Image (tube, helix red, strand yellow):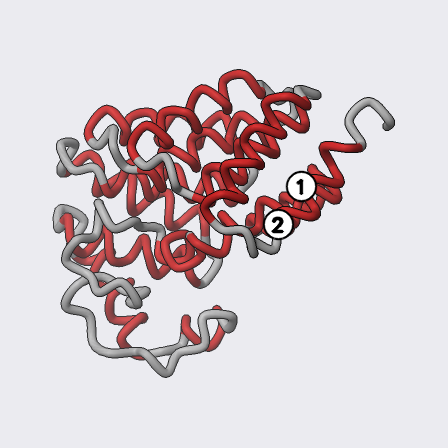
Amino acid sequence: MNKENIMFGIIGLVAGLVIGFVAANSVNRNAMTSSTEMSGMSQNSNVPPGHPDISGMNPQSPDAMANMPQVKEALQKAKDAPNDYDAQLKAALFYYQINKLDEAIETVTRANKLKPEEVQPLVVLGNIYFDMEKYEDAEKWYAEALKKTPDDISVRTDFGLTFVLRGSPNYDRAIEEFDKSLKIDPKHLQTLQNLTVAYTKKGDAANAKATLAKISEIDATNASIAKLQTEIDNIGKK
């Protein structure tokens, strides 16, 4: 399940306010990577470095993608070369995109064991478990990734979201993580948006309003402002 569906199912009307974050990270989520982990990739690429161009691929058609020769070749190579780190990681990315999450976990776990010093497999595992709605598992892997790259705002904010989305939310911990992201970039709109949601869900109108004011200062035309304000106004009425 993708983040959009998760958020609409759990947060209701506030979900649309979190979508700003989701949209900003959709490429990273679909490729299971962020700018830090895949510095060798172009920002618009959904495939590992050095992979043949598949720009014509429809990312919403996993069945079609699974039948592409280069994908089949990559998956077979991972099976034939279990000790090849790059092959395992590339296969994990493809398995994820064709919705074979168990296989994605298996291959990226193998990559992690081959090169435990690398951060990308940790983020990949976090992303897979996040999309499986196993937020405690996602938290574990994001935490490991952040030990290596503590200034990665994308991973840090995903980490914070695991505390918002789990069955027993921990809004204080989510707020703590969002605050850490904002120390890196105080004007990071997606983090501010998520922080406002966390305060709203917690019932803290004062801090929700203060955070919303920061969003307004940075981008007065931000489409989330009116919805956020409505949710803040409804605190205590539900």
* Image coords of residue 163 (percent x, y): 53, 25
Q: Which mark is residue 56?
A: none
Judging depth in this view, the residue of 211 and 33 nearest the camera is 211
* Image coords of residue 225 (percent x, y): 63, 47
Residue picked out by circle 1? 228
Judging depth in this view, the residue of 79 and 119 nearest the camera is 119
* Image coords of residue 32 (percent x, y): 35, 51
Q: Quadrant of residue 154?
A: top left
The type of residue carrying mark 1 is Leu
The quadrant of the image that shows the C terminus is top right
Q: Which mark is residue 224?
A: 2
At numbered mark 2, what does the secondary structure look like: helix, strand or loop? loop
The vertical placement of 170 against 145, above or below, is above
* Image coords of residue 26 (percent x, y): 44, 57
Q: Quadrant of residue 181?
A: top left
At numbered mark 1, what does the secondary structure look like: helix, strand or loop? helix
The vertical placement of 189 against 151, above or below, is below
Q: Residue sitting at 49 percent across and 47 percent down? A: 21
Q: Residue furthest bottom?
A: 56
The Cα–Cα distance between marks 2 and 1, rounded to whole angstroms, is 6 Å
Q: Residue sitting at 14 percent across and 38 percent down? A: 114
Q: Residue sitting at 50 percent across and 73 percent down? A: 61
The vertical placement of 154 against 210, above or below, is below
Using residue 2 as the reference point, say whether residue 120 is left or right of it.
left
Using residue 238 as the reference point, say whether residue 218 is left or right of it.
left
Q: Marks 1 and 2: in contact by CB < 8 Å?
A: yes
